Amino acid sequence: MYQVNEFQILHQLFEADKLTENELLSTIEELNSEPHANRPWLTEEWKSKREDILREACEKCGSEDSLILQHKPGTKPKLKNYLNCNSKQEYLDYIQSIIRYRSLEYDIQTYCRKCAYHEDKSAGLIPKKIKNLFKKA
């Protein structure tokens, strides 16, 4: 998946003390500035894997229309979180969170668009000013 191999190598090198903190920060900065770093779902690689793991129906309501993959709310790591790391273990945990998120192997659900919207809204990820397109008149 998008940048997963790069972050796995980075994790291994830093864990084995073959990369200094400055080298790690520089490499993370480069990876985070690449196109689609915060939107891996726009890559061909992601689109291909999506087809492999998308289920046939929404996990909440059973609908088979307009299905999407959705991470559980709150699992998307912030790309700039590495700036708050104060120890080697915190850096390794940050890198691991990027790998988990981008590998699409953890915390993934198949929802219809309506259920995905309500899941995000109930988690506070959608501002209240956004119009609910699914609300019945």
Image (cartoon, grey):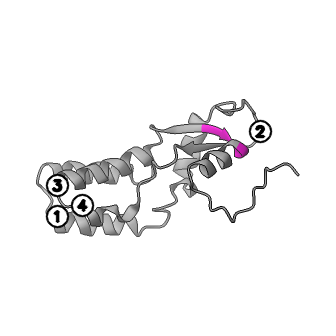
Identify residue type, mark 1: Glu
The disc, 1 or 3, on the residue closer to the chain's N-terminal end is: 1
In the picture of the structure, the residue carrying the numbered disc 3 is 88
Q: How many angstroms separate mark 3 from mark 4 (CA)?
A: 8 Å
Q: How many angstroms separate mark 1 from mark 2 (CA)?
A: 47 Å
Are the residues tagged 4 and 2 within 8 Å (C-beta)? no
| Mark 1 or 3: the one toward you | 3
Please tell me in which quadrant of the rendered image residue 6 appears.
bottom left
| Mark 4 or 1: the one toward you | 4
Q: How many angstroms separate mark 4 from mark 2 (CA)?
A: 42 Å
Q: Position of residue 75 (x, y in %)?
A: 45, 48
Identify residue type, mark 4: Cys
Identify residue type, mark 2: Asp
The disc, 1 or 2, on the residue closer to the chain's N-terminal end is: 1
In the picture of the structure, the residue carrying the numbered disc 4 is 85
| Mark 4 or 2: the one toward you | 4
The disc, 4 or 2, on the residue closer to the chain's N-terminal end is: 2
Are the residues tagged 4 and 1 within 8 Å (C-beta)? no
In the picture of the structure, the residue carrying the numbered disc 1 is 21
Q: Secondary structure at mark 2?
A: loop
Count of numbered marks: 4
Whether residue 95 is in magenta: the answer is: no
Q: Residues in magenta?
A: 110-114
Identify residue type, mark 3: Lys
Q: How many angstroms separate mark 1 from mark 3 (CA)?
A: 8 Å
| Disc sitting over residue 112 in the figure | none
Q: Secondary structure at mark 4?
A: loop
In the picture of the structure, the residue carrying the numbered disc 2 is 65
Q: Around disc 3, counting alpha carbons within 10 Å, would you say few (fewer than 14), some (14 to 19), or many (20 or more)? A: few
Q: Around disc 2, counting alpha carbons within 10 Å, would you say few (fewer than 14), some (14 to 19), or many (20 or more)? A: few
Are the residues tagged 1 and 2 within 8 Å (C-beta)? no
